[in-house]
Image (tube, helix red, strand yellow):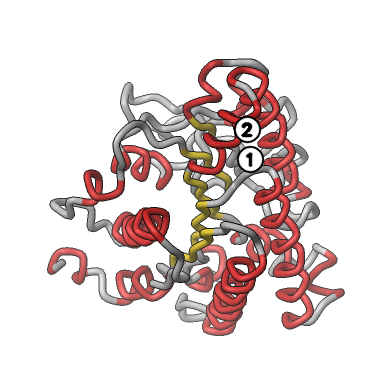
Amino acid sequence: MYTHRVGGEAMVQLMRLSILIVLISTGITENVGVSAAVAPSGDIVAFIFGDSLAEVGNNNYLQYALAKSNYPWYGIDFQGGKATGRFTNGRTIGDVIAEKLGIPSPPPYLSLLPNDDKLLKGVNYASGGAGILNDTGLYFIQRLSFDDQINCFGNTTMAIKAKIGEEAGNKLLQEAVYFIGIGSNDYVNNFLQPFMAAGLQYSHDEFVGLLISTLGQQLVRLHQLGARNVIFHGLGPLGCIPSQRVKSRRGICLSQVNRWVQKFNAQVQNLVIKLNKHLPDANFGFADTYQDVLDLIENPQLKKSL
C-alpha cells in the first residue's frame, strides 16, 4: 500500500482510509479499530466515483443502460435480500467504507432531486461500465463515464452552495473525503477487446499514457470543484478475472495483463505525487491492493490465517 505524504489531520484520515481499503479488499475488517480512528468529531461527507465495484444503483435510472444488476440473485445478501443496482450479492467497497467511517452509504446521484438535502451528506456517482476514457464501455449504450460523473459532481457543488452559501459550501467540499475506483473497464471493456479501436490503435505504452494524461486532467478538474482529500484505489490483478483466464489454455492468470495493470498503478502513483506538489492544499493518496488481492487468489488459505 502506498499513500503520498500530506500534512496534518488530512494526512491521518487519508492514510487510515487507504489502509481501510486494503483491509476491505482482502476481507480483513474485523477488530481493526479503523472506524473510530478515521472518523473525526461530526459527520464525514463522502463522495464516491467509479465503476461497477462501487455502484449503488445509478444505472437503474438510465433507460437504455445494458450494464444493470437489478436481477436475482444480486442483493441476496444485502439488507432486504433484493437487488438494488449493486453488482454484487451484498455490499460494495463503498458501502463498507461508509460503515467504517460511521456514516450511511451515500445514495446514487440519479436517485436524488437536483436540490435534495441528501446532497449535503455525500453522493455516489459510480456507474457500471464506466471508465476514465469516454469510449470505454461504449457497447453498454448508457453509463456515466468518469467525465460524466465529474459533471454530475459539478451540479452537486452548485446545489450545495445554493443551499448553505458559498463559504460554507466550499468548507464542506474541501473537508469531504473522495473515493475514486476506476480504470478496470478501460482495460477489460476497451483495450483488451479485439473489436474496440484502442487495442488496435495504440501500443500499451501509448494507451497507458492516454489514460494517465486523461486522469490527470480529471483529477485537476475535481480539485477545481473543491476536492482536496482524495483516495484513488488502484487496479487489482485483472489478468486473473474469469474473462481473461479463459483466454489461457490452462485457465491461469494472464501475466501480460497483470504487468500492464502494475504499470498503470505505478504511473497513477507518480501522478498523485505530482498533483500534491502542484495543486494548492491537495491531499491526494493512492491505495494499492494489487499484491494483497493476488496473494489471496494464489493462496486462498491466507484469508483464514489472517
- Residues marked 2 and 1 touching at CB (< 8 Å): yes
In which quarter of the view is residue 65 placed? top right
In which quarter of the view is residue 164 placed? top right
146 and 155: which is toward the camera: 155
Whether residue 106 is visible: yes
Q: Is residue 162 left or right of residue 100?
A: right
- Residue matched to label 2: 59
Mark 2 closeness class: few <14, some 14–19, many ≥20 residues within 10 Å: many
Mark 1 closeness class: few <14, some 14–19, many ≥20 residues within 10 Å: many
The quarter in which the C terminus is drawn is: bottom left
Q: Residue furthest front?
A: 167
- Residue matched to label 1: 67
- What residue is shown at x 55% (from left), y 73% (from top)? 269
The quarter in which the N terminus is drawn is: bottom left
Percent x, y of residue 92: 41, 43
Percent x, y of residue 297: 34, 70
Regarding mark 1 in the picture, which secondary structure is present there? loop
Where 19 sits versus 240, above or below? above
Regarding mark 2 in the picture, which secondary structure is present there? helix
- What residue is shown at x 40% (from left), y 67% (from top)? 289
